[in-house]
Image (cartoon, helix red, strand yellow):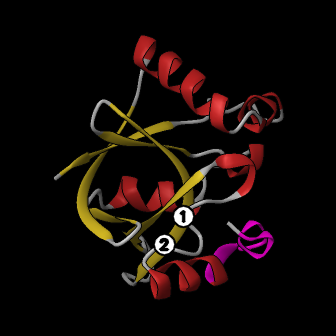
């Protein structure tokens, strides 16, 4: 990974990832790995793609709807709530997925695993009153 990959963000990250099948953008800051999540915009109906830190756990991809600890959920999460049909790209592989929000003991376990790869999640949770969702993306 180059230093330039660490600086990828937003649409530039999506573009570099897609153009290189993840050669650029899969590996990101502090050893994290990134997938591209494509949802359907709840207002526009247009596809929306977001680069997100993920971890593979028990054959599923796990992501966190942190939005940096903002008081409201990220747009991609609201899109999934409105229309759960989504797809992900992990390197060159594309996969249809069905999301579900982890609850209870599963959520606590997955939160701990995600905070191992991105410790800032713990800080984000202290910045907001909402319980940050942990989302499990299962193959559709």
Magenta span: helix, strand or loop, mainly? helix
Q: Which residue is the extreme one toward the top?
A: 105
Specify whether 108 is left or right of 131. left
Which residue appears at 50% of the width and 61% of the height?
76
Is residue 41 highlighted in magenta? no
Q: Position of residue 77 (x, y in %)?
A: 49, 54
Which residue appears at 52% of the width and 17% of the height?
108
Q: How many marks?
A: 2
Which residue appears at 29% of the width and 56% of the height?
84
| Relative vertical location of residue 113 with respect to residue 56 in this rendering, above or below | above
In contact (CB < 8 Å): disc 2 and disc 1: yes
Is residue 5 highlighted in magenta? yes
Q: Residue 86, can we see it?
A: yes
> Circle 2 sits in a helix, a strand or a loop, which is it?
loop
| Relative vertical location of residue 21 with respect to residue 93 in this rendering, above or below | below
Specify whether 127 is left or right of 63. right
Q: Which residue is mark 2?
A: 22
Q: Residue 70, can we see it?
A: no
Q: Quadrant of residue 56?
A: top left
Q: Which residue is mark 1?
A: 26
Q: Position of residue 103 (x, y in %)?
A: 42, 22
Residues 46 and 25: in front is 25
The magenta-colored residue range is 2-11
Q: Quadrant of residue 106?
A: top left
Which residue appears at 20% of the width and 49% of the height?
139
């Amino acid at each position: 990974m180059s230093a330039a990959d660490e600086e990828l963000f937003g649409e530039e990250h999506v573009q570099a990832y897609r153009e290189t099948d993840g050669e650029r953008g899969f590996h990101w800051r502090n050893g994290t790995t990134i997938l591209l999540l494509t949802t359907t915009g709840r207002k526009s109906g247009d596809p929306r793609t977001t680069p997100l830190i993920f971890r593979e756990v028990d054959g599923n991809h796990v992501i966190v709807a942190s939005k940096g600890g903002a008081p409201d959920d990220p747009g991609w999460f609201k899109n999934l709530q409105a229309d759960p049909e989504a797809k992900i790209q992990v390197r060159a592989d594309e996969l249809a997925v069905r999301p579900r929000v982890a609850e209870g003991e599963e959520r606590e376990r997955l939160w701990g695993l995600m905070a191992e790869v991105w410790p800032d999640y713990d800080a984000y949770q202290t910045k907001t009153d909402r319980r940050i969702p942990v989302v499990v993306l299962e193959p559709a």
